[in-house]
Structures are given as C-alpha cells and as structure tokens.
Amino acid sequence: MGEVGNACAIVTGHSRGLGAALVDSLLGQGLPVLALARHARGGAAARLREVALDLADAAALQRWLAAGELDAFVSGCARVLLINNAGTLGPVGPLSRQDPAQVGAAIALNVAAPLQLSAALAARVLPRGAELRVLHVSSGAARNAYAGWSVYCASKAALDQHARAATLDGVAGMRIASVAPGVIDTAMQAQIRATDAADFPQRERFEALRERGQLLAPTDVATRLLSYLQGDAFGAQPVVDLRDLG
C-alpha cells in the first residue's frame, strides 16, 4: 500500500477520541494508515484501511496476524509507525467487585495486544532494513496509583516497562516510547465521571478538570504526539509525559 521511501502507520482504537484524531492527522500528512478497532468509524477516506478486530480477543488477533494483511501493508514502507492507542478503563472498583473475565479482557487489550503488535512488526520490518517506531499511549496512572484503578494502573505501567526493556535491547532501526498524553476530553473521561464514587474515590477531581476547562482536545494532543513520534528526539527516553516536552 505504501511506496518505497514512504512512511506508513498502524493505529489501534481509531473509531473515536484520540485514535480518530491521530488517524485524521496522519491521513492529512498523506500517510497510508491501517486502523484496527472493534468497529469501523465509517465514511470513505483515501489511504485508510480499516480492520474490524477485537484486540481483546487473543485468538482473533493471532488469526489476523497469520493471515498476511499486516505483511502486505508494511511491505513497501521504509518507516513504519505503530501507535498502540486502544485501551479500556475497566473493570473499575476494588478487587472484591472485579469480574475476573473483565480483568482478563482488559489485560489482553491494554497489554497483550500492544506487545504482540510490536513484536509482529519488529519481525516484519527490521530484517529488511526499514525503520520501526512504536508509541504506546500510556497514562499518568502508570506512575501514580489510584484506588479503584488497579487493573488500569497495572496495565499502563506494563507498557512503560515494556518500552524501558525494549530500549535496553538496543535493536538497530527501532525506536520505542511509552507516552502519557495528559487528560483528554474523550469518552473515557465521560466514563470516569459516570463511575460510582464508591468504586473510584477521586471522581470529583476529574469532574473538576472538566468544569475548569482543563481537558485537552483530542486534535491538539494528536498533533503533539505525532510531532514527537516523527521527530529526532523520539525514543531517546523510553517513558515520557507529553506535558513535559513543552
């Protein structure tokens, strides 16, 4: 799909929020985009290939990786950008009220899928001398524990550690970073505000951020994330807070 010398991008969780803004910005740059999510966002866009795929379903992801669509997409790209954006907040609440099946699905989506996609692309891209850049969309919750968010905090911390360890591998042609983008005005924030305070005691803090107009616009964050991902400094630090970059 991409031509030799060009970049191409893979984005997960693109149907709304930050993922949708990232895809729009990449398409605006003229990059081919392969977008993975449970549901297509609809509409026609040149250079966009949408795949309906539940990334929480490990077997479905394995079948898709084996089918060859990813290989075909990246085959002509000299630089491949992977943005692991898809994620889920739940289950929210103390351990005694967490559904084990929901815990498993959250870890599959938040942790296993990003790591599998990163490994799959490294095996396909790096041996032929192309460049791979991997951006995990992390969170401040990876570095600060919140009552009720044990699964979310743990899963985002896992992405941070993955980036740190993969950086230490020192693989030629690969750059990776786990980036906390700040508090964005997305459906996840609406979900947080709708959570019972008994399950998430800090709900009022997030309600106040919205009331004070301190939630970030997805389009603005997407622009900054892509500028960082495509810049020379990307990968110099494996764990980054976007708000610290100025």
Image (cartoon, rainbow, N blue to C red):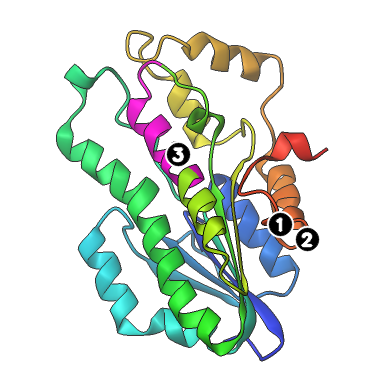
Is 159 part of what is drawn in magenta? yes
Instruction: Give the left or right position of residue 75, taking residue 229 as reference.
Output: left
Cβ atoms under marks 2 and 1 closer than 8 Å: yes
- Looking at the picture, does residue 30 appear above or below residue 150? below
- Which of the numbered marks, if any, corresponds to residue 50? none
**Quick one: quadrant of the C terminus?**
top right
- Looking at the picture, does residue 243 appear above or below residue 129? above
Q: What residue type is labelled 2?
A: Gly
Along the line of sight, the residue nearer the viewer: 86 or 125: 125
Q: What element carries label 3?
A: helix
> Which residue is found at the position 42% from the left and 68% from the top?
119
> Which residue is found at the position 47% from the left and 73% from the top?
121
User: What residue sits right under mark 3 in the picture?
Assistant: 156
Q: Is residue 39 visible?
A: no
Instruction: Give the left or right position of residue 59, taking residue 4 as reference.
Output: left
Along the line of sight, the residue nearer the viewer: 26 or 245: 245
Cβ atoms under marks 3 and 2 closer than 8 Å: no
Packing grade of label 3 (10 A; few <14, some 14-19, many >=20) is many
Q: Is residue 206 visible?
A: yes
Quadrant of the rendered structure where residue 3 is?
bottom right
> Which residue is found at the position 47% from the left and 19% from the top?
193
Q: What residue type is labelled 1?
A: Phe
As measured in the structure, the alpha-carbon distance from the residue carrying label 3 to the one carrying label 2 is: 24 Å
Residue segment shown in magenta: 147-160
- Which of the numbered marks, if any, corresponds to residue 234? 1
User: What residue sits right under mark 2 in the picture?
Assistant: 231
Q: What residue type is labelled 3?
A: Lys
Report the magenta stretch's main SS. helix
